[in-house]
Amino acid sequence: MTRSSIVSLLAFSLILPLGLSAQTAAPDLTDPEVAHVAVTANSIDIDLAHYAESRTRNTDVRQFAATMITDHSAVNAQAVALATRLGVTPADNGVSRSLVADAATARTSLEHVRGRQAFDRAYIDREIAYHQAVLDALDGLLIPTTDNADLKALLQQVRPVVAAHLGHARMLRTRLGA
Amino acid sequence: MTLRLAFCAGLLLTMSCRPASPAPRRYVVEIKQMAFVPAVLTVGPGDTVVWINRDLVPHTATATGATPWDTGPIAAGDSSQVVVSLGGRSPYACALHSTMQGQVIVR
């Protein structure tokens, strides 16, 4: 596996839940562009968690959002470290801009949700869908098809984090009720 | 950096501020793949339990039973330890990831 394909695979794992399906071919990006996509994708989820913190008054939802910020920041640091090891300088690109646009749409949708409890449910619903999509991509595509030992190890470390987030979100969603 | 914590009092499992016993044993609980390994650990009074975080993200080991104790945040690659006294069971969880649960049993 080439360096470009390795980095593309990592970035692909991060953009899957944001509009692309597992059947979609990985975008053809340069390494600097892919690094930018990876950082952008993590930053988008962190930003949404910050927004959730500003809207919710639910202690559990606030704590969940804080955990998302902490954990995705840690994963982002790993992505940046990988890019650094590969000698990649992140460069803005069309995929990153598309991700930002999609995130703005999702953010607008949440902004139109009225009522704190309705917002909490909508936010956690989105988080469940997000983490389920990432988990599916990791299990069905990314980990099985990765040859590079370092990348496979990283993806295998990320997988239980995503699974724990998903389990946490589901437990929380049950407590939030209909 | 390794945090060194000691806990006083408690009804079931307690973490004591007393000096360690002359020949205490040291047990390690690895935190990896978002789980405590082993999830259930049996120790003796005066023994030390060390939690080592091998995940990418921070964790805690926080009592969920009647007796409060908490390692506080353990950063990735870091560790925290407690000295155990008295007997009983103490369930605990990661305060940041509620699906992660464990138990310390003191003989």
Image: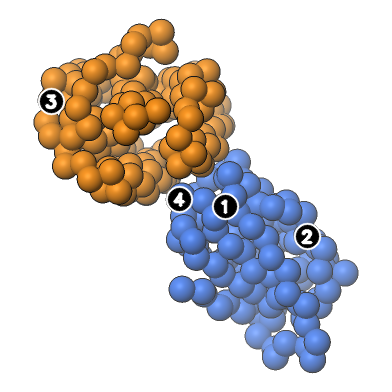
In the displayed structure, A170 sits above or below B71; it is: above
Q: Mark 2 vs mark 4: which is more N-terminal? A: 2
| Label 1 close to label 3 by CB (< 8 Å) | no
Measured Cα–Cα span from mark 1 to mark 2:
16 Å
Residue shown at 45% from the left, 35% from the top? A148
- Which chain is the one coloured orange? A
Element type at marker 1? loop
Q: Name chain B's colour.
A: blue
Measured Cα–Cα span from mark 2 to mark 3:
51 Å
Say the numbered circle drawn on residue B41: 2
In the rendered image, is residue A73 in sight?
no
In this rendering, position of residue B33 left or right of residue B1: right
Residue shown at 42% from the left, 13% from the top? A22
Image coordinates for residue A128, horizontal then vertical, percent = 45, 24
Please tell me which residue lies in front, A175 or B36: B36
Image coordinates for residue A34, horizontal then vertical, percent = 24, 30
Q: Nearer the viewer, mark 2 or mark 3?
A: 3
Q: Mark 1 vs mark 2: which is more N-terminal? A: 2
